[in-house]
Amino acid sequence: MPDALGRFAPCALIPIYNHGSTIARTVHALRAHGLPVLIVDDGSDERTRQVLDVLARDTGGVRLLRLPYNQGKGRAIGAGLLAAREAGYSHALQIDADGQHDTGDVPRFLDTGRAHPQALVCGAPVYDASVPRARLYGRYITHVCVWLETLSLALRDSMCGYRLYPLEAACAEIACKPPPARMDFDTEIAVRLMWRGVPVANLPTRVIYPENGLSHFRMFRDNLRISAMHTRLLLGMLPRAPRLLWRRFRGETACVA
């Protein structure tokens, strides 16, 4: 069941920090697919705040949740997931504000979520030549770590920020232990949901790096955080290993699409 009432009621969730020049295009594309949109402003600058105020005022189906200061992508997503659940939605489609993600794939994410309502539907990026080589190669290290942390090959890419969350499971995990506040959120919440027994659906989707795009990834600082996260998750896997292996043997957390 998608939620306690057996509904599939999705919304879109956009965390944003200073992407004032691209957010309107993303919002209007999502609204064209009929999705209600929840924007979480993570302490953006005044220019972006003004853009968001206009969007929330003039665009039907758009709600703005404003954090008092910049707290990090993970904190913004976590606040958005809890707010979406509180508003009565069963699923939240996380998508970036900077135009990296192909909104044309929204129906595919929703169809997959509707068919597999208990699953975490994760984007599996298909990159073009715009992807920075260092970022691309670094992802493979995380892929291997996640396969070890989950004792499973089910999740193809834990770092993609284009995904559909089943809110009941996601919010239960957040309530159990708040996830990381910054760029390590996407991977850690995916691993912890798999530990919880949530199945995974991988959906190939085109991802671009826009020319002159604004990235908040800080190579040294965020790689340190990601390294600490993998150490923490690998240690957390050890006491869970027998249960994870048993689930894998039974196929309970296998890829479902």
Image (cartoon, rainbow, N blue to C red):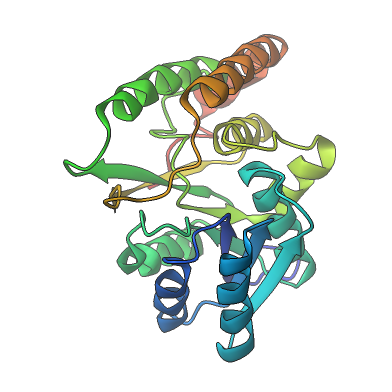
Instruction: Using residue 137 as the reference point, say whether residue 24 is left or right of it.
Output: right
Q: Quadrant of residue 184?
A: top right
- 234 is higher (above) or lower (below) than 138: above
Q: Quadrant of residue 22?
A: bottom left
Instruction: Using residue 182 as the reference point, say whether residue 218 is left or right of it.
Output: left
Q: Is residue 242 visible?
A: yes
Residue located farthest toward the left when viewing the structure as drawn: 129
Total numbered labels placed on residues in the image: 0
Instruction: Using residue 126 as the reference point, say whether residue 171 is left or right of it.
Output: right
- 140 is higher (above) or lower (below) than 18: above
Determine the residue positioned at 42% across, 61% down.
109
- 31 is higher (above) or lower (below) than 250: below
For this rendering, which residue is in front, 74 or 58? 58
Q: Position of residue 64 (x, y in %)?
A: 68, 72
Instruction: Using residue 96 as the reference point, say whether residue 229 is left or right of it.
Output: right
Q: Position of residue 255 (x, y in %)?
A: 42, 38
Determine the residue positioned at 66% across, 43% down.
72
Q: Is residue 9 visible?
A: no
Q: Where, quadrant-wise, is the N terminus in this rendering?
A: bottom right
Q: Position of residue 195 (x, y in %)?
A: 65, 29
Determine the residue positioned at 48% across, 57% down.
95
Q: Position of residue 175 (x, y in %)?
A: 83, 43
